[in-house]
Image (cartoon, rainbow, N blue to C red):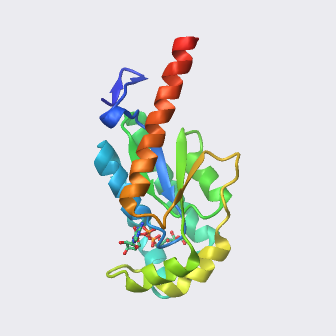
Amino acid sequence: MGTIGTVQSVGTMGVRPRFLVVMGVSGTGKTTIATGLATRLGWHFQEGDALHPQSNVDKMSSGQPLTDEDRKPWLELCHDWLSKEVKAGHGAVLTCSALKRIYREQLRRDLPVEFIHIRVASGTLVDRMTHRKGHFMPASLLPSQLSTFEEPGDDEPVIHVCGEDHPDVVLEKLIQQFRDEENQKELHAAVG
Ligand SMILES: Nc1ncnc2c1ncn2[C@@H]1O[C@H](COP(=O)(O)OP(=O)(O)O)[C@@H](O)[C@H]1O
Ligand SMILES: O=C(O)[C@H](O)[C@@H](O)[C@H](O)[C@H](O)COP(=O)(O)O
């Protein structure tokens, strides 16, 4: 499991270590899916919200959206965490809204990072954010989250999942996809 020298061995549940950012606007289920993946695969987990400077948390708590400038140092801390995990060679999962392409470019700069994008209808998001307890993010910021969001392009390393499904279903599908990719790679290697 993990790394043997610089060679990455097949790890927990037949899945090689990957370095994932679970992304999407507030309320899509990033924390739910990322913790589920980290638990099932034995990978490291970091909650991106915990890396925000207090000034960002205060701003969002008071109902004001963040600007590019506000997000820059936060994204750099997220990148630092990913960089450390890539060096360690252990599978790792970070939650981060990663709303714009430039943010995603900053996150994966020089790193083999992939994104898991959770898609959820806006009506569901309102419901989830209104009912979620003990979180600083107000539902009133949802419109700005949705208008800031840039859908990842086909040229970005992204897997889209349906966040309307039960989390167990999303996790099963993702882990199966990872396994299928491993099998495909092994088949190609065997065929030459
Ligand atoms: N697939 C899902 N189906 C139903 N409820 C969900 C699902 N994923 C998350 N939730 C619920 O929605 C709320 C937001 O989820 P959370 O994981 O905190 O999202 P995010 O980290 O993207 O803000 C939480 O109350 C969570 O329990
Ligand atoms: O870039 C941003 O505007 C924030 O990161 C935002 O997208 C994020 O959603 C909040 O930090 C709330 O946290 P949750 O996404 O966990 O609700």
Residue 185: x and y, percent? 52, 25
The residue drawn where x is 32% and y is 36% is 13
Residue 84 in view in this figure: no
Is 169 left or right of 161, judged from the image as shown? left
> In the displayed structure, does residue 42 sit left or right of residue 103?
left
- Rendered position, 155 above or below 52: above
Count of residue discs: 0
Residue 109 occupies quadrant: top right
Figure check: 189 above or below 90:
above
Instruction: State the residue at coordinates (39%, 49%).
Output: 172
Residue drawn at 48 percent across, 69 percent down:
28
Residue 29 position in % (x across, y down)? 44, 66
Which quadrant would the C terminus be assigned to in this image? top right
Quadrant of residue 131 within the rendered picture: bottom left
Vertical relation: 38 (above or below) 24 = above
Point 47% across, 47% down: residue: 20
Where does residue 92 sit, x and y in percent of width and height?
A: 39, 45
Quadrant holding the N terminus: top left
